[in-house]
Amino acid sequence: MVRVVVVGGGCAGIAAAVGARKAGAEVILLERQDQLLGIGRIAGSMDVGGRYPLHLEIVEMGAGEVNEALDAVCLPNVENYRKSHYPHHSLPGSEEMTKHSWVYNVLTAEPVLRKLLQKMGVEIRWRSRAVDVAKEGSRVIKVKLANGDWVEGDAFIDATGSAGGQNHCIPDVGGCVMCPWMQCATFGNRVDICGKAGATTVSMHQKDGRPGIKYNGLYLYKGSLSKELQQQLDENHQIFVPFRGVIDWDVDPEWSWGTRGQDGNDGMGHPADPETSWRVAPDVGRFRLLDRGIFAGGAGPSPIPLEKLREIPGFENVVLAAPVGGQNLWSLGYDLVFCEDCLRVPPLDNLFTAGSKAHMVDVQPGINSGYLAGFNAVRAAVGQEPVELPRTTVTGDIIAFTQQFLRDSAQTEYGGPTTFVSAHAGHYLRRLKDVGFFPDNPEKARKRIAEAGLTGFFKQQVI
Ligand SMILES: Cc1cc2nc3c(=O)[nH]c(=O)nc-3n(C[C@H](O)[C@H](O)[C@H](O)COP(=O)(O)OP(=O)(O)OC[C@H]3O[C@@H](n4cnc5c(N)ncnc54)[C@H](O)[C@@H]3O)c2cc1C
């Protein structure tokens, strides 16, 4: 039987494994940790901005399994949550941005996805960190694990993401903050598998030119907040807690540098496009706490020493989930790979990628690109040409747009991107609006996918 080996079990790797199984291959998923979902174990926010058309499309294309699993652990009070967003999200022109938003429970999502993979017949190998590859000509033939074992396959998918490990975080962004999704001290650092295979990769760059991006945000253990704040969170799902007068943190260009592609600001902390901005300058005087299950939190000012945080009313006993230490931020954006629009990674014939490894951040782009990578890996394994999705679909568009963005940014003084491509906000959401993909609705998406000839596309077997 044809075997596809997926490296990395984040949302992209999970969807790739399901996609390759549906297309008819035997699938081995190598995950360095003992849990799936990677950064998705702290994410949770779905269907904001351009994530929604991507969600509608993957369902239309016959690949709703991963979304259905996450939907099954959706947090309650969705209507209250939708009403609780930043005031500018309900202004004319912006109201579509959060209209469909919901959050999956980050605590219960992983077991649900694990069951999905088991049901689909994916073999998961835990604590299996890929460290090298062996090739024959332009084909990868096997992947080496940190324990010295080799895993052979007919096609491979690098879905290892772009975060850390400690080998990057310590020299590049000031230190390890013990993020809950990488756990490098126990499971070892991420490895650039595409790079090992001879592909071209490029890293993001900070304002001072150092590699990797500091990703701001503050995630607290919900149970450590005051009873009042917990109650408000239970009811409204999302609350804003002012910190002015306690914490001296203003519109600081430094903290919004890496995320300005999502904020729609100009890198100086000023909102450029309120219609597509997730956060805007007036909102930085308060924390946005979004209930994500065990954690409450969101992108915004950080890092702040614990003793300072505990001076905020309601935060007296607060415990930080991440980033711990009050000195550093998370790091992302390493070893992003150049690929074809079918997600094949040149110069290899049978290596594919998906998700944040190819600079498409957010859970939904990871899922959509994962399914395509899984499908195309099976085609490559049996000697068929992989397929591209047309740019008349958001799924096809975000892949092509992001690769162009990577190529263009590699020509700049930084030699790589300095901000993210993210469907939920910022410059890419602006594009979706300008092109007419956004706002979206089920009927519009159904028509778009039907016209592209892709209805039920991922239900077809390659083998
Ligand atoms: C703080 C924060 C909050 C976010 N919130 C949201 C949100 O609310 N909604 C949203 O849509 N997006 C959110 N995002 C973005 C989103 O979470 C990520 O873009 C997405 O989860 C990335 O998925 P991935 O599968 O590409 O990579 P990852 O999640 O990084 O997964 C990579 C996997 O590969 C494994 N791996 C790495 N190297 C190896 C190796 N050598 N061998 C084997 N396995 C390996 C890792 O252990 C990991 O499981 C957030 C991001 C951050 C940082």
Image (cartoon, helix red, strand yellow):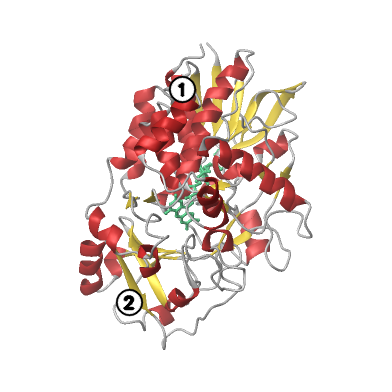
Residue located farthest toward the bottom when viewing the structure as drawn? 245
Residue at horizontal 54 percent and vertical 41 percent from the top: 355
Q: Image quarter for residue 147?
A: top right
Q: Which mark is residue 248?
A: none
Question: Which residue is identified by label 2?
Answer: 315
Q: Horizontally, is 115 left or right of 308 in the view? A: left
As shown in the figure, which amino acid type bears the numbered disc 2?
Answer: Phe
Instruction: For residue 191, say whether it is visible.
Output: no
Q: Total of numbered circles in the picture?
A: 2
**Residue 408 horizontal side relative to residue 276, left or right:** right
Taking the spot 45% from the left edge, 83% from the top edge, the residue there is: 247
- Residue wearing tag 1: 457
Secondary structure beneath label 2: loop
| Residue at the (45%, 43%) spot, across then down | 364
Q: Earlier in the sequence, mark 1 or mark 2?
A: 2
Q: Amino acid at mark 1?
A: Phe
Gap in angstroms between the C-alphas marked 1 and 2: 49 Å
In this rendering, the answer to whether 2 lies above or below 361 is: above
Pinpoint residue 101: horizontal percent, then vertical percent: 34, 52
Q: Residues within 10 Å of mark 2 (few under 14, many from 20)?
A: some
Q: Secondary structure at mark 1?
A: helix
- 169 or 384, which is in the foreground? 384
In the image, residue 149 above or below residue 356? above
**Residue 61 coordinates in the image, percent (x, y):** 43, 27
Q: Nearer the viewer, residue 410 or 450?
A: 450
